Amino acid sequence: MLAKRIISALIAIPLGILIVYEGKLFFLLGILFITVTGLYEMRNLLLRMNLRFPPLLIYGNGILFPIVAYFLSGSNQMLLLFAAVTCSLMLYLIAMIISFPRYSAAEIAVSYLGSSYIGILISYTILIRHMSPEGFFYLLYLLILTWAYDAGAYFAGNYLGRHSLCPALSPQKTLEGVAGGLLMTVGAALIFQRLHPIGAYFDTVVLSLLIGIFVQVGDLAESALKRMAGVKDSGTMIPGHGGVLDRFDGLLFSAPVAYLYLKLVLFR
């Protein structure tokens, strides 16, 4: 399993960095691929919970937000994204009316939750990449710290883990793993700071801790979904890692946190 994880990382990480560096069409296509694949895995998880809903609804809503985020520009980014969220919610409510009584309100609601969970949160990677003129370095910083937390938590948890973090959701997650992940995240941030400063050292440490904490929160959120669905992994696409959601669950939570910290604290 470890060998598969390393081989997958050696292939995926350089490719991912190249796509992020390109930052245009291939970057958008890469984000849409992650989004659609994640929505497919999400739909399968929800179906395993005996929840039914129109498939076009979850896919359509999920890919809406990355596309909107990609074409947003200027100071009205957040206003326009909020408008997209509002329109999406209204369309779901209209769909509930049209589809009655075939689908229940709960099924329509969980479809909205699942598609927004992926579509809205992944859109923040696009907003970060478009932050001028350092968007590439900000997103690279986020990716490196997210990967650092995952690596630190994995190895510390496997070799030092004794005390369970959340046994009801994920018995293998430990407090020692969290500590190892945070230490690795802060260390990676300080190295990055020496090579390409993001802000003051204080901001670097605070942001790295926030990223690490929310990577773990994202992992637990996906663990809750898998536990409800009764599966170990969300999919099998990435050898050694499971599905796309298994690999990007932390990024879905760390990206909004990083964006908001950069916008509201560093560049306010």
Image (tube, grey):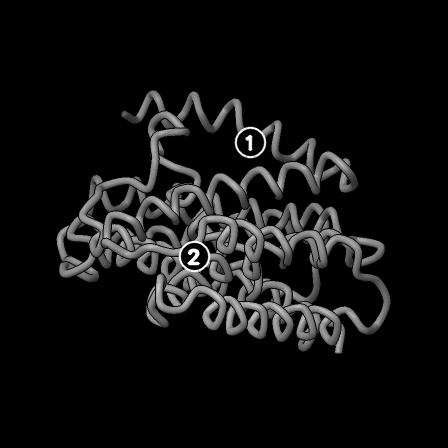
Residue at image location 84% in from the left, 62% down from the top:
73
User: Mark 2 falls on what kind of element?
Assistant: helix
Residue 48 pos. (x, y %): 24, 48
In the rendered image, residue 74, in percent from the top left (x then y), is placed at 86, 67
Q: Is residue 9 above or below residue 140?
A: above
* Dot label at residue 5: none
Residue 154 is left or right of residue 115, and the answer is: left
Q: Determine which of the numbered discs, if any, sits on residue 215 in the image.
A: 2
Position of 112 relative to 139 (above/below): below
Neighbour class for label 2 at 10 Å: few (<14), some, many (≥20)? many
Query: Picture coordinates of residue 72 (x, y %)?
Result: 79, 61
Residue at 62%, 56% in the rendered image: 123
SS for dot 1: helix
Disc 1 to disc 2: CB gap under 8 Å: no
Name the quadrant of the C terminus. bottom right
Residue visible at 52% across and 60% down in the picture: 208
Q: Amino acid at mark 1?
A: Ile
Q: Quadrant of residue 79?
A: bottom right
Residue in the image at 38% along x and 48% along y: 43
Q: Quadrant of residue 214?
A: bottom left
Disc marking residue 13: 1
Distance between mark 1 and mark 2 Cα atoms: 17 Å
Q: Nearer the viewer, residue 240 or 209?
A: 240
Task: Specify the amino acid type for callout 2.
Answer: Val
Local packing at callout 1 (Cα closer than 10 Å; few below 14, some 14-19, many 20+) is: some
Left or right: residue 242 versus residue 208 is left
